[in-house]
Amino acid sequence: MTTESLRARVGRLTVRSIALAYLLAILVGPLAMVFWRTFETGFDAAWNALSTPETLNAFKLTLLIAAIAVPLNTVFGVICGLAIVRHDFPGKGFLNAFVDLPLALSPVVVGLSLFLLYGREGWFGGWLEEHDFQVLFALPSMVLATVFVSLPFVCRAVVPTLREIGDEQEQAASTLGASRWQTLWRITLPSIRWAVIYGVVLTTARCLGEYGAVAVVSGRVQGQTETATLRVEERYDSFDVQGAYAISLVLALIAILVLIAMTVLKPKETTA
Amino acid sequence: MTSTELTTRAGTGRASREGATALSLSLVVAFLTLVVVLPMAALVWESTESGAGGFWDVVTSPQSVAALKLSFGASLVIALVNGVVGTLIAWVLVRDDFRGKDVVNAIIDLPFALPTIVAGLVLLALYGPTSPVGVDVAFSRTAIVMALLFVTLPFVVRTVQPVLHELDGELEEAARSLGASGFTVFRRIVLPNILPGILSGVALAFARAVGEIGSLVIISGSLPYETEVASVYILTRIESGDRAGAAAIAVALLVASFLVILGIGVVRRLATRHDVVLSRT
């Protein structure tokens, strides 16, 4: 080994150590803590904290919201991606900006704007009250908030893949007499399915973890409009740190599953 | 098939294509209007209820100025840190090789997958009053910066990584063989190519940090004038029934978000132009 490569080697190892030390301090250390803290007082304590009716309800509600929001955003994301890549129309820049907005906007601002729209003094508030339809502090507003914050993921996952595959196969299919629907189902969707699934995984993670927007519109009624993330805060504020850690652990385990799914799915897209 | 049949067929094909475009566009616009545009309109409307003067009074009140300053200041700090450390991590993941690199690469996305409220709680567990490593930064501005660093970690890494991957080593090797030092090679050859990636990653991280709430509600302590960030301030305004006040600060954040999105668009356009020039020469 020459002296020059020795110097390069020292440099490389230094950069590597800095990167790994940073990741350990910011990422791995804190995550390891949640496991340690949860089981500090034994497995039973964690289990008891998780199996209270309020906590179970919170998880059920979180899953229900995700079960509504994820399919909505998947359909929207695919249609929106196709519109952006395959069609030209005035105002495309606007559309792009609005689709990206949830990535850059504070969830509290999202929650507040829904609050202002559907609240008693809001634009739709009076009409909703007359017809006895509860949006705010109920499931509909929580779904709307969650749909908003998780809006871009499927669309943004689908757009690069659609660009990459081009539209030659679609054109060939329609020249051979396939209808628009047939082309969509037989050609377009199968070729972007991994991108769609990747987007769905990201959307699901965002839906399950949403806090800020839901905190504003839910009203946080225990056992009714309290999601898993709100439950973490409620337990912490009621000095039941053990309970907060136990719920966090379940959410962290879901996050790790999401991470594994992302890792398995991603290379298929980047090497394609 | 006669030629007239063919023309009609082509004609209906075009018509159905246009019909499908119109249908999918109306669906997209209708959904976006319901979910995004209407709420935003209601927000902007509410903030103008008390007139421009009222809006300005709310935004420039001492407590909101303190909250906005803290949010933007902390976000600026973490944007800079991310620009440097994120690039460094991306470099290690692309150019370095060691055992367990795949695992390290996978956990970069953890902050995207982990609920932010959990992130705040675990950071408090490690760097709070009961810290096992003896570091207690709970309820301080340092804690806010650390929480923001956690949630924004993936942005720069993930925007720089693909560009670095595509950049083949030939130019760098040529420069090195001509006697350029490692740092010169990085500054003159690698950096200009990955700069658009770094900038858009930094901008996304900045926007995310300005609006962050979940990871901060527990660890920041939310002390007015000290550790109360803008998004937490909005939440307390809502809870105390001050809709106009909350809306005014929210509009300030909304404008900042739009500016960041526009900025990223500009960087991307410049970057693609840069690519064209490079491929021609």
Image (tube, rainbow, N blue to C red):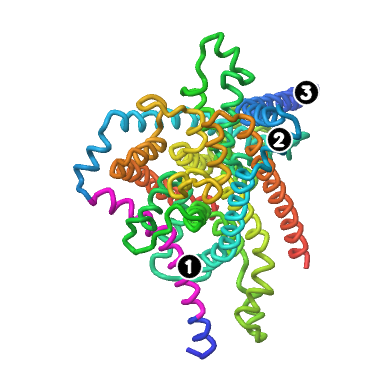
Q: Amino acid at mark 3?
A: Thr
Marks 3 and 1 share the same chain: no
Whether residue A1 is situated above or below residue A254 in the rendered picture: below
Q: Earlier in the sequence, mark 2 or mark 3?
A: 3
Which mark, by number, is residue B2? 3
3D distance between C-alphas at marks 2 and 3: 69 Å
Residue B140 point in image, percent of width and height: 47, 55
Where disc 2 sits, the SS reads helix
Q: Which residues are magenta?
A: A11-40
Chain letter of mark 1 equals A
Which mark, by number, is residue A76? none
What residue is at 21 percent from the left and 49 percent from the top? A41
Residue A64 point in image, percent of width and height: 41, 28
Q: Confirm whether the magenta stretch covers residue A26.
A: yes
Residue B12 point in image, percent of width and height: 74, 22
Q: Amino acid at mark 1?
A: Ala
- Looking at the rendered image, the disc whose residue lies closer to the viewer, 3 or 1, is 1
Q: Amino acid at mark 2?
A: Phe
What residue is at 57 percent from the left and 18 percent from the top? A120
The residue singled out by tag 1 in the image is: A19
User: Residue lying farthest bottom?
Assistant: A3
